[in-house]
Image (cartoon, helix red, strand yellow):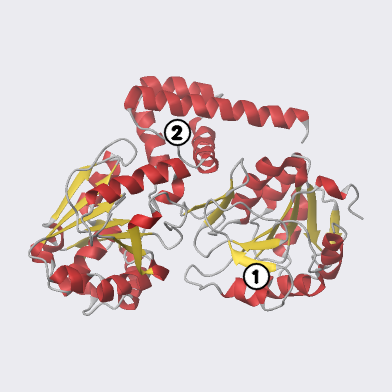
Amino acid sequence: MVGAKKKYQAVVIGSSAGGLNALKTIFETLDKRFPLPLIIVQHMSPDADNYLPLFLNNMKKIKVKEADEKELPQPGIAYVAPPNYHLLIEHDKTFSLTVGERVNYARPSIDVLFETAAEAYGEGLIGIILTGANNDGTVGLKKIKELGGMAVIQDPEEAEADLMPRSALEAVKPNHVLKLKEIANLLNTLI
Amino acid sequence: MKKKEEEIIENQEIEIRLLIEAIFLKYGYDFRNYSQAHVKRRILNRFQTSGLDSISEMTHRAIYDTDFVDQILMDLSITVTEMFRDPSFYKALRQSVLPVLRSYPFVKVWHAGCASGEEVYSMAIMLKEEGLLHKTQIYATDFNPLIIRHAKKAEYPISRIKEFTFSYQKAGGKRSFSDYYTADDEKAKLNENLRKNIVFANHNLVTDSVFAEINLIVCRNVLIYFDRQLQDKVIRLFLESLPGGGFLCLGSKENLQFSNYFHAFEPVVDQERIYIKKYSS
């Protein structure tokens, strides 16, 4: 389905309202042998603790951890942006964290991750926009597509909150519009 | 990657490096070892609002127009902060650090990268409640003189007081937060007695050196903007400023694990990034 799977080096996922359930559904179908770094921004309260990595780790799929500053993402590990920090990808692919202004009312912001990841990975990147009630991620997904990466959007009909996927659909011609299970199956073809 | 886009990105990055170099050569502010992704985002934001045609034009203007450079310095400053940011950190500080400092005849605290001052005043409030403020000298420093001017005023928008009050309570505040400020319709001004033991000064962690022996250094969410090399340089500066048993507090996502000077410190409250300098080092 993906074709030329060697080309891809990383996957970024952005989700907001309804994102926990959506990520859960993807992780249920995701194969333990998934071979790329998976980097996630899920909007959450600034004083949230690190329940998201715990929650996803409990599903016993790929290892999930909070992204540390200067960390180099490793194959087969999922990274979650910490609450109240933006997560950026440097040219050498390492993570940076910042406490800069909110972007699209959000910190972490999906656009900040997607735009910097697009520049770092170019055509080696897959960007996925899931459920959400704002338009964060649209600009970033557009950039991923422009730089030769793959753009995937959750089917708005399925999304708990459809504003974010619809906003992305209006601005970007995606490679795929898929339901959550299909997104997981798509990722599994990268093995 | 498509060739054309690749070249645009490459050219942009060359232009940004030249701008950063020009600011260093002309004004001495050194952003060359900052996180590149961060610098790029901030410079491109400024470029978009500048009305100029290219980043190279920004370089020209930065050399000749000091007001414009001030804007760029603000862009590259870390200005997002709040009182009692990460309340659990302040709670740990109160429980594990201040009791040690209480035994000292005189205490010196250095808040490095104080920005608009919210966290410095949070510290002053805690020191006051623990009966330490009268014998403490706080040095609050930042590289950006404009932001220090702001910090000295000790005035914050009234709209933020609710959030500050909430964090103050979560941090284990012992009184009513409203005891510490007077408010009008727009702003809250912190009490003079919180400010009198604070010296605000210009200090650049990248280019300046040790200025005093310090018992407690607080430098939170500054190192995340630096590359590894610069982080190590700054940690060394802290190491040289601390006596054995001196405290170093970093931001909740910063740690010494990858530093060359990791072994010179040991954690006091690991989770909150509170470290002590070992006596032997």
Is there any visible trace of residue B98 in the rendered image? yes
Name the disc covering residue A17, or none. 1
Mark 1, chain letter? A
Say which amino acid is labelled 1: Ala
The structure residue drawn at horizontal position 45% and vertical position 57%, both measured from the top left corner, is B257
The structure residue drawn at horizontal position 28% and vertical position 60%, both measured from the top left corner, is B278
Query: What percent of the width, then of the height, locates residue B158?
Result: 31, 63
**Residue B274 figure quarter:** bottom left
**Horizontal side of residue A36 vs B40, given as left or right:** right
Is there any visible trace of residue A160 in the rendered image? no
Say which amino acid is labelled 2: Arg
The structure residue drawn at horizontal position 65% and vertical position 31%, both measured from the top left corner, is B9
Name the disc covering residue B32, or none. 2
Asked if the residues shown at circle 2 and circle 1 are in contact, with their CB atoms under 8 angstroms apart, the answer is no
**Residue B120 figure quarter:** bottom left
* Number of other residues with Cα within 10 Å of mark 1, as a class: few under 14, some 14 to 19, many 20 or more: many
Query: What percent of the width, then of the height, locates residue A163?
Result: 71, 63
The structure residue drawn at horizontal position 35% and vertical position 34%, both measured from the top left corner, is B70
Q: Nearer the viewer, residue B89 or A181?
A: B89
Label 2 and label 1: CA atoms lie apart by 38 Å
Query: SS class of the residue under badge 1?
Result: loop
Query: SS class of the residue under badge 2?
Result: loop
Q: Vertical placement of B95 versus B32: above or below?
A: below
